[in-house]
Amino acid sequence: MGISLNGKVALTGGSRGLGAAVALAFADEGADVAISYEKSTERAKAVVAEINKRGRQSVAIKSDQGDPSTAKTLVAAVIERLGKLDILVNNAAVAWQGRRIDDPEIDEAAMDRQWAINVAGVVANIRAASRVLPDGGRIVSVGSGVGTRAGFPGTADYAGSKAALIGYSKGVARDLGPRKITVNVVQAGIMATDMLAGSEEKLPAGILDLHALGRIATVEEVAAGIVFLASPAASYVTGSVLDVNGGYLA
């Protein structure tokens, strides 16, 4: 079995960074791709154009990951525009870290919004997609190494939101197993995204020492793990966590 996704339709969140890399990687393997976005309209259109250049169909759908009520509408729009849905990737997330939980200046509203985007939105997407995915469908959620190994202070809410994805995904894997739908988590490491601009010098001192490989990841490296789990080659992998994080606290 290979990783060809010919004939599949995938939905992934995000129009830049890892989301864009996943969308393009799916298209390179033959899938049609829907991308959801909240604000970056022009970037979303650019990703769609790149997918179309690869000879695949694509559509960008505006949706707020932090509002669970939009999940059913999002999934319905994918089916209306591309005919079906075979693969769901929960990629949209925010990471608000740096303040300890007992810091009186912590932005509690931001922390609540983080839980809404990172957890409630993912749960809603999975619930909506589970009703339309065919037998043998795929669900992949993007977690973080801090979901199982916090490593440093100031990450409590973010780490908790990513840990929640693991427990929920394992439960969904059991629920959807009879339909041969696989459900997995990719724990991504620090990536060369727009925010980091590929500059390791912007990272906190010593953080690369926590990684066995001593460097940050490219978004393409993390996308490769997601493509694998979405492919026929991973048909017997479910309820699992794949670390693509350079040996973070290995």
Image: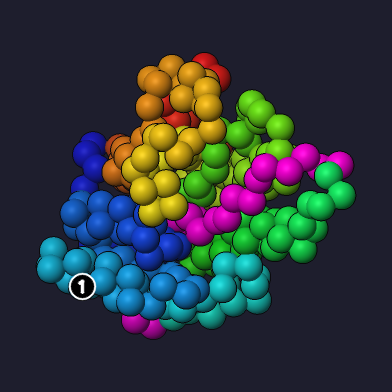
Q: Residue at x 38, y 27 (%)?
A: 215
Determine the image quadrant of residue 177.
top right
Residue 4 in sight: yes
Q: Residue at x 26, y 71 (%)?
A: 46
Label 1, secondary structure: give it: helix
Q: Position of residue 232 (x, y in %)?
A: 30, 43
What secondary structure predominates along the stretch shown in magenta? Answer: loop
Q: Which residues are magenta?
A: 79-102
Q: Which residue is mark 1?
A: 49
Name above or below for residue 205 compared with residue 235: above
User: Horizontal placement of 66 versus 37: left or right?
Assistant: right
Q: Position of residue 76 (x, y in %)?
A: 48, 79
Residue 167 in sight: no
Structural crowding at the residue carrying mark 1, measured as other residues with C-alpha within 10 Å and reported as few (<14), some (14–19) or many (≥20): some
Which amino acid, by three-letter code, is at mark 1? Answer: Ala
Which of 167 and 19 lies nearest the eye of the viewer? 19
User: Horizontal placement of 96 versus 187: left or right?
Assistant: right
Q: Residue at x 55, y 56 (%)?
A: 93
Q: Residue at x 33, y 58 (%)?
A: 20
